[in-house]
Structure formats: structure tokens, C-alpha cells
Amino acid sequence: MTPELSPLARALRREIEARPQQFHELADAHRDAAWPDFLRAWGELRRAGILGRDEDGNYRIEVRQ
Amino acid sequence: MKKSFRDFLADLDAAGELQHFGGEVDLRDVPGLCAQSAKASFFENLKDYPGWRLAGALITSKKRLALAMGCKENEVAWRFEEGMGRLIEPVMVERAPCQEVVRIGDEVDLAALPYPLMHLFDGGPYISATFVVSKDPEFGRNCGSYRLMYRSPDETGIDLVSPSDMRLYYQRRLDQGKPLEIAVAIGCHPYEMLAASYKAPTDLDEYWVAGGLHGQPVPLVKCKTVDLEVPADAELVLEGELLPIGWTEDEGPFGEFSQISGDVKWNPVFRVKCVTHRRDPIFYLLQMPWENDWLAAPVTEAAGLKALRNASVQPVAIRAPVGSCGYWTLIASIRKRPGEGKNALLALLSIAEVKLAIVTDDDIDIENPDDLDWAITFRVQADRDLIVVQGARGKHIDPSIKAWELGKGGLPTTAKLGIDATIPEGVPKKLYRRIKVYGADRVTPEDYR
């Protein structure tokens, strides 16, 4: 079962779902968050197993079966 | 006692080569500040990282490389070779600064360590200044340097694509369905980093190499949760295991040592079980590609010296330019006897990585690009002084090889070029007599002020 995401992780998920993005685009969009908090939210997406990549290195949401 | 990372920082400071940032700095601004500083950078107050300091871009010039090695700039290859000639066994110690603070299991939080996003297209923040230790029951202990990409508070990606001893160790464990224990020391003296980048034979322990470079044994301490030993004076240590999942998880891109943004790769995952560090730790941000390339240069140069001597050629100076990443090009001046320009080229091109070799006489200052251009202009005839070797082993990372045409698992080949810029046999040396200014040795501008 996927654990519940924090508000910041949910926001990151929404932004990636809207458009595949580079890591730096997501980091720039959340300069208001403390860097450790941003990384922990990123870790939530990793642990949820929903992050995929395209050939340009963009992150995309990819729910694995 | 051998020198530590902190001793090197003190040496940089004493030489006026360390810029201090005393005010509060957002970690996300650190790479940009490091890149714009003419000196090495030291951040004393990191926002959101109480207790941590950060040193970055330490070896981004030959001057600072020479400072790390305690020698003159034109002596680094010889200094490295000298250290390699006196391998020194490490010693074990019971207590270590790197274990003043211990965080195990649920206390592990990699997001609490200060490493920023370093380059625009990186797949995430990276730990770049790693000294990675692993063991194999048959081949023994190995130390290398492998980049780590943040994934979650207890996991990183690790680039294990290229052939290496640790890749071999991992494959052997993977074949048994078991993880490979590793320990990652961060904040080690440049000699440890040089030893880690040296491609030692599989049965040679790089700790002995580091000891040789220091001229004193490296003190080691046993890790808390894995059967490995790390440098006792390191700033920070990550202990854990490479999961037995093979090359299945995305990692990268990362600003590579080739000075090119790489691709997404498929790699294993490092799960961290324990973090230990000093009470007042200093994080080391190794600035790619420059620090990596400067640290690669002495290793390539020492290989060049060895190859020349094996070919009975007498080297006078040698240089692996940072423009070739300290890796692909070797330029040497030699005390030449007839035919040895070509012998020297063949020797240098025999080094696996070297793609371009240039050999000159010992009257040429190979550190001076203008002097080198002059030698190539007037001592080279293209129809007799170039050597091209086709079909030698290449590296995927070189775009000119077109490795993508080979398909998955294909091994690329490369052409190699040698340029003999020594005075050709049969051409009188007096034809190369350089202009000298009349009277320059007996008068100075001060005499007429």
C-alpha cells in the first residue's frame, strides 16, 4: 500500500503529472521550502515507486504494476 | 600522523587559497558561489544545516593540486610516482574522529546532509567526493570513488556502469543473490582521493597506495555496522549495502568528468544503514569536472612516466592537460636519441585511456601552449611525424566514438593519434636557435627610472 504523501510531495507529484520535468525545474519551483524538507518530500515519491524517466532525463509519474 | 582533510584546508588557508563565507548561505547557492570563486571555498554557516560546514572546489588549479601534494607544480607526476614506489600498510585504531556521532537505522537521514544540486541537468543532488570501500573474499579490499545520487533519506543511486573492481565484487555477490557491503568516507585528504582514482591491480589495496603518497600509514577504524574499515580522520562515513537488484534503477545524468552532462543510466541502489561523522563535521563538495580532472592528471602522468621508462626513453617533463580531463592526452618532453620520438609515442599511446600523445625535445616548455605550438609548427611534417592507431579500446563517454551505434553492451573502439614534435633526425639543431633579445641580461627598466 502506498503511504500517504506529505503536502509538498503531493505538490511535486501534481507538477510532474502535469508535465515531465527536470529536477532543477522542480527545485527552482520550491525555493520557499527548506532544502532538507524538499529532499524528504522527493524521497517520499521515490519510496512510493512512482518516479520514471524519459530519454531526456525528465522525471515523470509512472505507476509500476 | 599523516595529514587529514582539515590539514589540507589549513594548508590552503595559509597559502591564501581559501575563501571564507562567514554569513548564512543557502545550500542551493553553494555550487554557483564555488564556480565563481577564484579560490577554494569554505562555508561556515549553512542555512538549515546547523553544525555543518562545507568546503568545495578545493583542487581546481594545478597550484592547489601541487599544494595538496607538497611539491612544485611541475613535480606532481614525479611525486605521485615516488609515493607509488613505497607502499605503506595502514594501521588500525580503536577510536576515530569520524565516529564521534553515530546514527543507525531509523536515525539515518541523508536529507540532513548538506549536498546541493550541482549542475543544471543532474538527476538530483550528488555526493561527489566519495572514497568507497568494499571487500571480496577472494580479491580482498578495494577503494574507489563512485558518485552517489540522492534518492530518499536512506537510499542513493550509485554509478557502477564502468568496469571496476567494485563492479566485479558486486556482480559476484549479485550472482549469489546477496548484497555487497560498502562504506563511503567523505572529507578525506587528496592523497586518499588520488589513491581511489588510481587503477590499481585488483589485488592491490589502495590504502597502501594512500600510505605511500603520505609517506605514513593511513589510520583506519572498523565500521559500526559492516565488516569494512574507513579512514579514521574522515569527516563523514555512510555504511550500508548495494542491494542485489542489478542495474535496474535510474541514475543520472550528472556533470561528468568529461565536462559533458551525461545520460540517465541504469544502476544499483545503495541502502544506507548507518551514518557516522565528526562532532563538528565539514562536508566536502568535489566540484565536477575540474577537481576530478585535476586529480586524474597525476595518475595519467605517472602511467606515462612508467611507459616511457619501460621503452628506455628518458622523460624530462610530462603533462596530462585538464582540457583532456587529465585523461585522454599526454604531452611529454624527452631527452631524445635518434628514433626515440616515435618510441615515446608508441609507449604513451599504449596507455589504455590516452587518445592523443605529443612528444617534444627537452628545450620545449610543455606547460607553455605557445612553446608547444611552436614545436609542432616547426618540428612536425605531417607525412612522417604522425602515428595513427586504429581500433584501440575506447570509452563510451567520448561522443566522437558514436558508441550508440553499437547497441546495448557493445564495446567501442577508438583511433589514437601520436605527434612527434621532436627535432627530426638529420635536421641540424642550430636551425632551431631561438631569438634572444640583445642586452636583456644586463639591463632592467629600474635602471632607467
Image: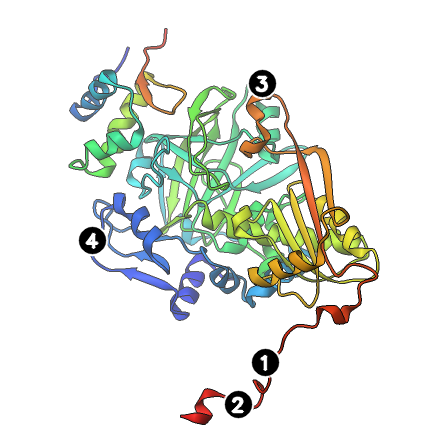
| SS type, badge 1 | loop
Mark 4, Cα crowd under 10 Å, few <14 / some 14-19 / many 20+, is: few
Residue closest to the eye, B23 or B232: B23
Mark sitting on residue B24: 4
* Viewer-side residue, A15 vs B339: B339
Question: Do marks 3 and 2 both belong to one polypeptide chain?
Answer: yes
Disc assigned to residue B443: 2
Which of discs 3 and 4 lies nearer the camera? The answer is 3
Q: Chain of mark 3?
A: B
First reached walking from the N terminus: tag 3 or tag 2: 3
| Among the 4 quarters of the image, the one containing residue A6 | top left
Residue designated by label 3 = B407
CA gap, disc 4 and disc 2:
53 Å
Task: Specify which label sits upstream in the sequence, 1 or 3.
Answer: 3
Check disc 3 and give the amino acid type: Gly
* Label 2: few (<14), some (14–19) or many (≥20) C-alpha neighbours in 10 Å: few
Tag 2: residue type? Val
The Cα atoms of the two marked residues, 3 and 2, are separated by 67 Å
- The mark closer to the camera, 1 or 3, is 1
Disc 3 element: loop
- Labels 1, 3: one chain: yes
Q: Earlier in the sequence, mark 1 or mark 4?
A: 4
Q: Is residue B251 above or below residue B324?
A: above
Structural distance between the alpha carbons of marks 1 and 3: 60 Å
Q: Real-space Cα distance between discs 1 and 4? A: 54 Å
Label disc, if present, on residue B437 of the rendered structure = 1
